[in-house]
Amino acid sequence: MSAVLTIEELRSGLAWRKNLDKAFVVVGLLILMSCLGLLALLFLDLVRDGASRFGWDFLTQFPSRKAERAGILSAWVGTSMIMLVTALVALPVGVAAAIYLEEYAPKNWFTGVIEINVTNLAGVPSIVYGLLALGLFVYKFGFGQSVLSAGLTLALLILPIIIVGTREALRAVPKAIREAAYGLGATRWEVTKDHVLPYSTGGILTGLILGLSRAIGETAPIITIGALSFIAFLPNSPISGTFPFVNFEWLKSEFTAMPIQIFNWVSRPDQAFQQNAAAAAAILLGMTLAMNAIAIWIRYRFRKKINW
Amino acid sequence: MNTNVVHKAETPKLSIAMEERKALRANPAKAIAEKLDFWYGSNHALKNINLVIPENQVTALIGPSGCGKSTFLRCFNRMHDLQADTRYAGSIMLHPENVNLVGKDVDPIEVRMRIGMVFQKPNPFPKTVFENVAYGLRLRGFSNRTDLAERVEKALRGAAIWDEVKDRLNDSALALSGGQMQRLCIARALATEPEILLFDEPTSALDPIATASIEELITELRQRVTILIVTHNMQQAARVSDFTAFMYLGELVEVDATSKIFTNPSKKATEDYITGRYG
């Protein structure tokens, strides 16, 4: 016999190695389940605590001194408007930056430094963005404690997420496709606009939504720039019945947001406000999960359409 | 690199074999590479290449892996310009205007607009069949719907795929089979009526039946367009080409009429390669 092991040795050794394989599956599943379980537990706890407050009134009422009459209308409207500004600013800037870095920038030390810093920006504490925004947007540019300032701040915060996500998406477009377009005589911009961008839309939108779901829960930077915790009015509607039908007054409006409202309620001694906080937190968590679900759906849709 | 030294002694100096001379009298040159050198960074990938590409004929480039045949092919449409740190020297003159395709003052995009390319792996855009073929035309400013439709049909017929796709012009090109995709890519290149069509091992990712259909197509296309094809497959070179150039270690060892190369090569290295002694 020429084999290095007898058949018995081979089998017992293999049995041991396969057991290790199974053990890893068990450990992995346990860890995964405990993570998901914790999240589910947290969510259920919030829902239970806030159960008495869920309802139409909670969504349509302004905050109030009386816990049972307080609602989150100004908070969720504020959050929605801030998210709108954030998305409208961060998407074009982030995508343009990613296109430049991925498709245009020469590979030298300068772009190397930029790349490292983009990655570093993702790790900067959010309060630092708040301080920057306070100095720059609120005072220097004179945007004040407004929806615009908050939206711009959060846009800065999620810019690295969008840049990194977009670059991944652009990189996933095969070289063969670019060569095909160049081979027909396309310029760099035509290759980008006609091919690379359309084929990576799914990945780019996924990056945007993941960025927004990070931004929606941010508290520190918008407290820093001066979000109010008690607002009993709504910003002007961006759409109106009279010409020119859109206005930008709402950008200058003072604002509050979901995390601010929750923080405010939690810090009150009255037990009834704790229930409000739990209900609002459950809704915020629901909004985040819904956004992630949309991201997954978009990715799935685009993957089905484009299969390299 | 002893072999290199041996073959260097055999490298022709712009000498055109008798057979090719005869053929060239009937078919004027479409392009002439003269003293062409090419570098990837410090890697001297092509060395003093001299080759005449006759008009409306198929010229095959053969040679072992890494001999520079694809590198040479990609000089013709300046694909190397997409990579940093690449350099050309010498010339590839395109007739009749005598434009140096690798000249520094010649815009690579202009070159690619005149010289089409079909790649190793079928690479249709994830768009409809119609939009794939129309893309080159759109880049050139064609937008009239009926004009586009006519030209797309002509190109698809030219690539012998019209009957298979005429009812699915608006379906995704990714739904086609591998052989159909490759013929679609040929149609895409044909739509803009290139002066030279480059094929970079066009059948290496295809099954034998699809390969046969592409080879048949290449034989038909030579009536209309000058073809330069890189192939790993010597039988393929023998089947489809009029002229064959054998490359080795970045040099052009021998070029002649295909029938001559495969029956009576004048260089020892060529004979060794085509008889399968290395490759």
Image (cartoon, coloured by chain):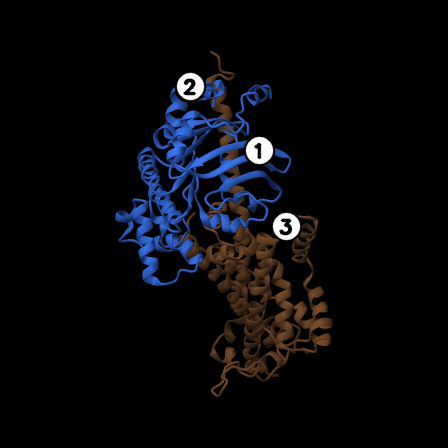
Q: Quadrant of the N terminus of chain B?
A: top right
| Residue B233 in view in this figure | no
Label at residue B45: 1
Side (left or right) of B177 relative to B50? left
Instruction: Give the alpha-carbon distance from disc 2 to disc 1, as whole Å.
Output: 25 Å
Label 3: which residue? A106
Q: Decide: few, some or many residues near mark 1? Use Cα within 10 Å; few <14, some 14-19, many ≥20.
A: some
What color does chain B have in the rendering? blue
- Residue A97, given in percent of the width and then of the height, sits at 60, 59
Question: To which chain does the residue with label 2 belong?
Answer: B
Task: Measure the C-alpha gap from mark 3 to mark 2.
Answer: 46 Å
Identity, as a three-letter code, of the amino acid under mark 1: Ala
Residue found at the far front of this picture: B25
Front label number (3 vs 2): 2
Residue B25 in view here: yes
Furthest residue in direction top, as rendered = A1
Residue in the image at 48% along x and 51% along y:
A185
Q: Secondary structure at mark 3?
A: loop
Circle 2 residues within 10 Å: few <14, some 14–19, many ≥20: few
* SS state under label 2: loop
The secondary element bearing badge 1 is classed as: strand
Q: Colour of chain A?
A: brown
Residue type for callout 2: Thr
Whether the residues at callouts 2 and 1 have beta carbons within 8 Å, the answer is: no
- What residue is at 50 percent from the left and 57 percent from the top? A190
Between the residue at mark 3 and the residue at mark 1, the CA separation in whole angstroms equals 23 Å
| Location of residue B47 (image quadrant) | top right
Circle 2 is placed at which residue position? B275
